[in-house]
């Protein structure tokens, strides 16, 4: 209760208050390790997933790792592609409390697995190159693989840099066997790791402790000394370390090297409460390290503290939600886009009633002619009666904001139960399996910490 009461007393603030201090990374793209690849493939640096492998047309490549679900497993074993040409007609029952055997919705237009995720076929004379190999499909054709996992593109991706068929963002499809984009290794020293977050490509240590930079430092020069070192620990580099891409070292004291990223010395915050915590960014002048930032939300959106983290709100501060869905077919097709069957969403947001659904989870309406200039955020017309993509001339069509080509929503609620104030986040996890495979999740940019006095800290304050 103390945490909730403290959150209620905090005014919300804009996205720039969270990410603005990382402006040095906003226009930058993540560096990656160059490695041999077969002819016809390339690397494209995407806005959210960073560097990804793509085919000759720039279409992102994906794998489908096997995953244990609620009542079975789905996905592909290493070296064994199973995404086939037959239409899956019945549910599998592997991710649901319901048994398998139910007819899949919109069966007359349901595509086969390979129509949704076209295999990346290899020529008959293809040879392995580095981590790239060739597998034999069940239909006899050869397919490219990376680290022995079969490679696919997505029918949702239209342009280079699109990564709409899958993601590594946390919380997306946790109860499903989702597709994962594949890319080269990040060009960081062995001590570091890069992970996908809503805010950007976050740098951590290999053990997942966050790292930070300090506004008071000079270029390749640390001014964190004396009392500063009571709270911050320089990330020390082995004395034999050499420059790694955008990472350099400098001698902070005789015989002691410290890592710097783009000239900014890097530190750990030993009092972070847990792995992956970003508590140190709540201290004025200190910032998390990103190899690249994601595009900012559209103008007028707000960033606000909630009990589950720093969340995205509309112009009034009301929590914004995304819808997540993977169907229960053996091929685990996505069902969270307006181009997919809407029966699953109607079931969890309106008991099957589209009108009730729109009232419970209203679309976030975009101004006419709104532009974002990036792939992550956009707009589209939706027919609220069907939940499907529409045009400006469709009767009753709504122009709505989208995240990764999926509409976003607020939660008005049902029979008096809904978000009523900015701190409310009542629909987070609303749906089947806590929304792990069918439901609504709040859009969260980072965790949020308690400071030493037990109060929730705002970005840039202590």
Image: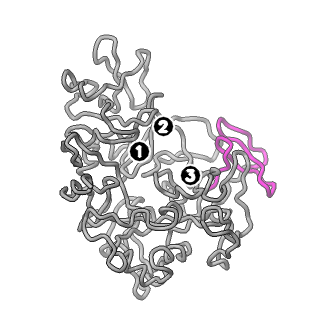
Query: Image quarter for residue 419?
Result: bottom left
Query: Image quarter for residue 7?
Result: bottom left
Q: Residue furthest bottom?
A: 395
Label 3 belongs to which residue? Answer: 180
Looking at the rendering, the stretch of residues picked out in magenta corresponds to: 123-152
* Element on which disc 3 rests: strand
* Disc 3 to disc 1, C-alpha distance: 16 Å
* Element on which disc 1 rests: strand
Label 2 belongs to which residue? Answer: 186
Instruction: Say if mark 1 contacts mark 2, CB within 8 Å.
Output: yes
Q: Is residue 142 magenta?
A: yes
Horizontal side of 454 relative to 262 (left or right) equals left
Q: Mark 3 or mark 1: name the one nearer the start of the chain.
A: 3
Instruction: Say if mark 3 contacts mark 1, CB within 8 Å.
Output: no
* Disc 2 to disc 3, C-alpha distance: 16 Å
Label 1 belongs to which residue? Answer: 201
- Tell me if mark 3 has few (under 14), some (14-19) or many (20+) residues whose alpha carbon lies within 10 angstroms of its own: some
- Tell me if mark 2 has few (under 14), some (14-19) or many (20+) residues whose alpha carbon lies within 10 angstroms of its own: some
């Amino acid at each position: 209760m103390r945490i909730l009461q403290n959150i209620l007393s905090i005014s919300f603030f804009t996205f720039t208050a969270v990410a603005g201090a990382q402006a040095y990374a906003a226009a930058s793209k993540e560096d990656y390790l160059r490695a041999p690849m077969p002819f016809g493939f390339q690397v494209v640096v995407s806005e959210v997933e960073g560097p990804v492998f793509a085919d000759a047309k720039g279409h992102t490549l994906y794998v489908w790792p096997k995953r244990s679900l609620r009542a079975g497993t789905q996905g592909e074993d290493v070296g064994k592609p199973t995404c086939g040409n037959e239409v899956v007609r019945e549910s599998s029952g592997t991710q649901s409390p319901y048994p398998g055997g139910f007819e899949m919705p919109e069966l007359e237009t349901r595509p086969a697995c390979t129509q949704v995720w076209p295999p990346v076929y290899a020529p008959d004379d293809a040879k392995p190159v580095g981590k790239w190999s060739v597998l034999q499909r069940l239909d006899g054709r050869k397919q490219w693989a990376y680290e022995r996992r079969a490679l696919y593109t997505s029918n949702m991706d239209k342009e280079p840099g699109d990564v709409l068929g899958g993601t590594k963002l946390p919380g997306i499809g946790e109860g499903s066997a989702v597709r994962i984009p594949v890319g080269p290794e990040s060009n960081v020293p062995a001590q570091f790791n890069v992970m996908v977050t809503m805010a950007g490509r976050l740098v951590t240590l290999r053990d997942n402790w966050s790292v930070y930079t300090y506004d008071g430092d000079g270029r390749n020069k640390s001014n964190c000394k004396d009392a500063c070192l009571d709270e911050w620990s320089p990330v020390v580099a082995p004395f034999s370390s050499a420059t790694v891409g955008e990472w350099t070292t400098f001698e902070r004291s005789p015989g002691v090297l410290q890592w710097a990223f783009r000239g900014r010395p890097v530190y750990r915050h030993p009092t972070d409460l847990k792995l992956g915590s970003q508590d140190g960014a709540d201290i004025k002048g200190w910032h998390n390290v990103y190899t690249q930032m994601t595009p900012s939300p559209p103008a007028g959106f707000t960033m606000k503290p909630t009990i589950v983290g720093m969340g995205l709100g509309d112009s009034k501060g009301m929590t914004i939600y995304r819808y997540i869905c993977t169907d229960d077919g053996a091929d685990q097709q996505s069902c969270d886009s307006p181009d997919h069957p809407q029966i699953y969403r109607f079931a969890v947001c309106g008991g099957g009633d589209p009108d009730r659904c729109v009232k419970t989870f209203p679309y976030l309406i975009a101004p006419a002619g709104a532009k974002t200039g990036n792939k992550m955020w956009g707009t589209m017309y939706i027919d609220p009666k069907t939940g499907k993509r529409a045009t400006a001339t469709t009767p009753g069509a709504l122009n709505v904001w989208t995240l990764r080509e999926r509409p976003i929503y607020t939660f008005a609620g049902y029979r008096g139960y809904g978000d009523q104030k900015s701190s409310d986040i009542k629909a987070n996890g609303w749906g089947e399996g806590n929304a792990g495979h069918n439901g609504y999740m709040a859009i969260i940019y980072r965790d949020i910490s308690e400071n030493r006095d037990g109060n929730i800290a705002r970005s840039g304050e202590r």
